[in-house]
Every structure is written in C-alpha cells, then in structure tokens.
Image (tube, helix red, strand yellow):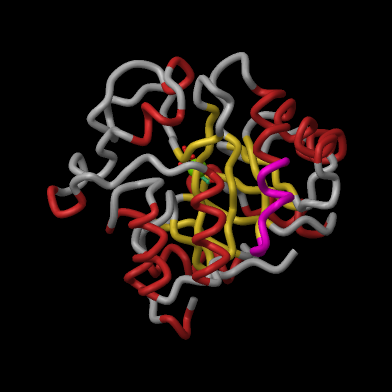
Amino acid sequence: MIYPRIIAHRCGGALAPENTLAGLRLAARLGCGGVEFDTMLAADGVPVLMHDETLERTTSGCGRVADLDSISLARFDAGSRHHPAFAAEPVPTLEEALRLCAALGLWANVEIKPAAGQEVVTGQVVARHAAAATGKLLLSSFSSRALLAAADEAVQLPRAMLFEAIPADWRERLMETGVCALHSAASGLSVDALQAVRDAGFPVACYTVNRRDEAERLFAMGVSAVFTDRPDLWTPAEM
Ligand code: G3P
Ligand code: MG
C-alpha cells in the first residue's frame, strides 16, 4: 500500500468546506497527492459525502442524512457555514467525488461512515461505487461490519481499519477484517504499539495532524502518512 505522505482531511481540510467538490479542487491546486472524505447513505441509498449523521453543522439543511434522498440533499448549501465565498456549494454524491478525484489525479481515502444500523449496506454500496471508479483509492472505516461487507462486494479494493487509539487486540481486529493498513488518531499513538503494527507488515496513517513538527515527529517514528486540515503547510514537492 503506497500512501501519499500528506492527505487533505475531509477533502480540503480547514481551507474549504468539508466533504465538498470545492475542497477537492483546492486540494489539487495546493498540490496534495491525496484526499480523505466521509461517505454515508442518503434515504434513496445513494452514497453522499457527509461526516455527521445530521445536516445542521455543515449545511443549510436540518434533520438526518438517512431520512432525505440525494436529490433533496444536493439542494442544500454545504459551503456557507464554512465561508460565504463557498455559498451554494452542494452536498456531492460519492460518484461525483470519485469522478473529480480521477480527473484531478487525486488518490482518495474513502471513509465509510455509516449511520447507526446501516453498517453493512453502507459498506456494500460504497464498495460497489468505489470498484467502478477509475482513480486510485483506499476504503477505511471504524466499523468492522462495514469493512467486511465492503470486502464481500469488492475484495480487490485495499481497506484500512480506523481506531481512535491502537487497541490491545489490534492483531485480531486487523486479521478478522482482512485489512491491509491501520489508521489511528495521532494523539492515541504509542511508540511500542506503532512498532508492533509496522513489524507485522501493516502501514500506519494518523489523523488529524495540523502542525508540521508533529507530522515530522510521526514520520520519524515510522508513520506512513498524515491526514491534515492544513495541507497548505507543505509544498507540493513535500506532499
Ligand atoms: O479517516 C481519518 C479521519 O477522518 C477519521 O475521523 O471523524 O474526521 O472522520 P473523522
Ligand atoms: Mg473521516
């Protein structure tokens, strides 16, 4: 598994509205090699880019993402909460995001972010869309059930398991889901656990790293990539 070193968190990090096509365009302009975004199912089963189960924090809509169809979601403004300059930026579908990543040459980490109770179907549907994409990508999730469902649907796609901290039973968790990499919060990372995971052949990527010195410390420890809200801290040659 080859990672870009610097991955723009939620598309463009803090510089653009999260999980939007504007974020992807900005990440590409900054010279990012890779982006991460979250995907969840709308009521009609279409995967859209969204982090929260509810719309209020990032969009002009209200209520649950899982209760509204993708056409209704697309009408909400997902840009103005970040800055009025991004007014009318829509909630993109996963398909739109993957098409744009391929066109911009962006490696994509598609995080499967199921609404509660929708782990299996979200894993299946996201993997089906990802398998049809032409760009390079990696699936990830905090949900073992979503990761297993994704593998049933598209076994050829690389997958990573997400943790808030590397757990004591990391080996069993990685084996039972069959993933090829581990993603952990940088704050929960212990040197010994990192070394053990790497020695077992699993690359480790860390979120969310918004300082250069912290990223350098993690790279020196053997971390393969960092997710950042501040991709502007690096030059294109460094990413
Ligand atoms: O995939 C890394 C990171 O995005 C996981 O946390 O909550 O930002 O999706 P979150
Ligand atoms: Mg995420």
| Closer to us: 139 or 175 | 139
Q: Residue 111's image quarter?
A: top right
| Closer to us: 199 or 10 | 10
Q: Which residue lies furthest to the front in this view?
A: 71
Q: Is residue 24 above or below residue 80?
A: below
Q: Is residue 92 above or below residue 36?
A: above
Give the residue at x 54% y 22%.
Answer: 44
Q: Indicate whether residue 133 is drawn in magenta.
A: yes
Residue 14 located left or right of residue 171:
left
> Which quarter of the image is occupied by the N terminus?
bottom right
Give the residue at x 37% y 30%.
Answer: 73
Residue 192: image location, x then y, percent:
69, 52
Give the residue at x 49% y 70%.
Answer: 104
Give the residue at x 73% y 32%.
Answer: 124
Q: Give the range drawn in magenta.
A: 128-136
Q: Indicate whether residue 159 is drawn in magenta.
A: no
| Closer to us: 203 or 94 | 94
Q: In this view, does 56 lie above or below 229?
A: above
Q: Which residue lies furthest to the left in this view?
A: 84
Residue 96: image location, x then y, percent:
50, 50
Residue 178: image location, x then y, percent:
85, 42
Numbered marks: total: 0
Residue 233 located left or right of residue 183:
left
Residue 205: image location, x then y, percent:
60, 56
| Closer to us: 51 or 234 | 51
